[in-house]
């Protein structure tokens, strides 16, 4: 288990540029970075949904600077890098929805592939940047729909435009990594392929937990597409934890951190949508479920092998799926009872996760 003080101390006072800070994961990681004393600078499009975590939890107030700009515009990125002069970059900005990618494939490729290239190009041209952590997805692999947990060396692919655009981004990231000896070998570039994220404050369309939250609040049936689909579910803080561990490794100059990393839960936490709903109902409320199959292709079975991150980075998720569901349900229940309490509620969960990390570190140290 990573020593919590170790990776947090390394990021204290660091200037970190977070792209996508107005999004779901971006909001959580921005608050965590601010909590430990990093100087966070955000660059993102404005929030798309109402409500949204950015406004409710006061994410902008946690930033040293916050700018609404589009990563598809290189000039805007260059201006941000010149202004911030970051030590580290956490690149989260993306078009993150599979179903939207069918309706907007060109926008999806422009954001996820070209936007990533614009971030990397701005980073390599800005002196002082130690490294970039690019966040992609578990869906970058050529999914054969078999009982196989994908490893970082498995072939990339992608059936839908979202998955394929992220696989393209991974190829571009690897190209930059391999080519840096011709430019600036001191810039370290890592990518993190995260599993399915759950947690409070997500109101995206066509995602299981936000759809559940909306249905529960409106006392409506929950419409799902694929009840037997298996995914690697995990709390957003488990992923934020991994991203910070990676940023800290890069801040230390660890060249071996500059590679792709799977960030997923234990195999036992890879369950079906149907099982997720059954478990979530125990923490919240039972809903009537309607199954309306989608005509668009979606993977049926997807699992990650994250043993490399556990072994080489010392990252282990501090919360199980049971704990993640309890915290997620508690966040949304709290929101509908007291929307104004979003910021303290979110900060309290960050502190609870950090406490769980400390407990796990102590147990690992004592062999208990």
Image: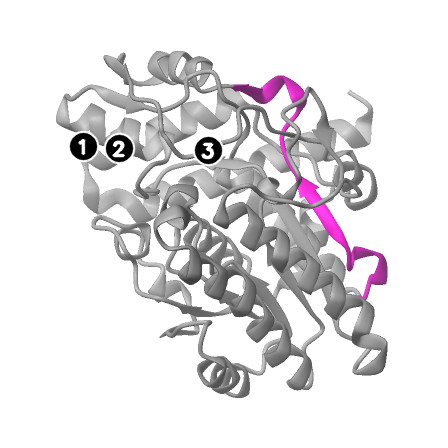
Tell me the CA gap for discs 1 and 2.
5 Å
Quarter holding residue 2: top right
The answer to whether marks 1 and 2 mark residues whose Cβ atoms lie closer than 8 Å is yes
**Image coords of residue 284 (percent x, y):** 30, 18
Residue name at image x 79 percent, y 83 percent: 183
Residue 327 shown left or right of residue 365 in the figure: left
Up the image or down, 82 lies above or below 1; here it is below
- For this view, does 38 lie left or right of residue 216? right
**Residue placed under numbered mark 3 in the picture:** 297
Label 3's element? loop
Q: Which residue is mark 2?
A: 334
Q: Residues within 10 Å of mark 2 (few under 14, many from 20)?
A: some
Instruction: Determine whether label 3 and label 1 are within 8 Å by CB.
Output: no
The residue sitting at 45% across, 55% down in the picture is: 26
Residue 309, x across and y down, in percent: 75, 41
The spot of residue 196 in percent (x, y) is 51, 35
Q: Which residues are magenta?
A: 253-271
Q: Are marks 2 and 3 in contact (CB under 8 Å)?
A: no
Residue at the image position 57 percent from the left and 37 percent from the top:
195
- Residue 251 seen in the figure: no
- In screen coordinates, is 50 left or right of 86? left
């Amino acid at each position: 288990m990573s020593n919590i003080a170790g990776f947090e101390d390394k990021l204290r006072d660091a200037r970190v540029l977070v792209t996508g800070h107005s999004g779901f994961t971006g909001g959580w990681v921005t608050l965590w970075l601010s909590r430990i004393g990093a100087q966070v600078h955000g660059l993102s499009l404005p929030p798309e949904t109402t409500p949204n975590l950015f406004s409710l939890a006061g994410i902008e107030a946690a930033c040293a600077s916050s700018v609404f700009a589009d990563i598809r515009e290189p000039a805007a990125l260059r201006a941000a890098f010149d202004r911030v002069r970051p030590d580290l970059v956490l690149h989260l900005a993306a078009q993150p929805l599979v179903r939207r990618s069918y309706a907007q494939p060109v926008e999806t490729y422009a954001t996820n592939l070209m936007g990533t290239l614009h971030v990397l190009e701005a980073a390599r041209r800005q002196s002082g940047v130690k490294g970039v952590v690019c966040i992609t997805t578990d869906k970058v692999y050529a999914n054969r729909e078999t009982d196989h947990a994908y490893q970082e060396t498995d072939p990339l692919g992608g059936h839908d435009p979202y998955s394929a655009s992220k696989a393209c981004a991974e190829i571009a990231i690897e190209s930059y990594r391999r080519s840096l000896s011709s430019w600036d070998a001191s810039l370290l570039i890592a990518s993190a392929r995260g599993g399915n994220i759950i947690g409070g404050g997500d109101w995206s369309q066509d995602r299981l937990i936000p759809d559940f939250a909306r249905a529960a609040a409106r006392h409506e049936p929950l419409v799902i597409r694929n009840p037997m689909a298996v995914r690697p579910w995990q709390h957003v803080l488990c992923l934020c934890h991994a991203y910070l561990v990676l940023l800290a490794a890069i801040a230390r100059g660890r060249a071996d951190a500059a590679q792709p990393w799977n960030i997923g839960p234990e195999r036992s936490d890879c369950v079906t949508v149907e099982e997720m709903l059954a478990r979530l109902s125990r923490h919240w409320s039972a809903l009537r479920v309607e199954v309306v199959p989608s005509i668009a292709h979606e993977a049926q079975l997807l699992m990650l092998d994250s043993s490399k991150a556990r072994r080489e980075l010392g990252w282990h998720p501090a919360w199980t799926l049971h704990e993640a569901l309890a915290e997620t349900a508690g966040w949304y229940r709290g929101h509908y009872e007291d929307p104004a309490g979003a910021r303290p509620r979110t900060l309290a969960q960050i502190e609870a996760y950090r406490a769980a990390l400390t407990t796990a570190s102590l147990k690992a140290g004592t062999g208990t």
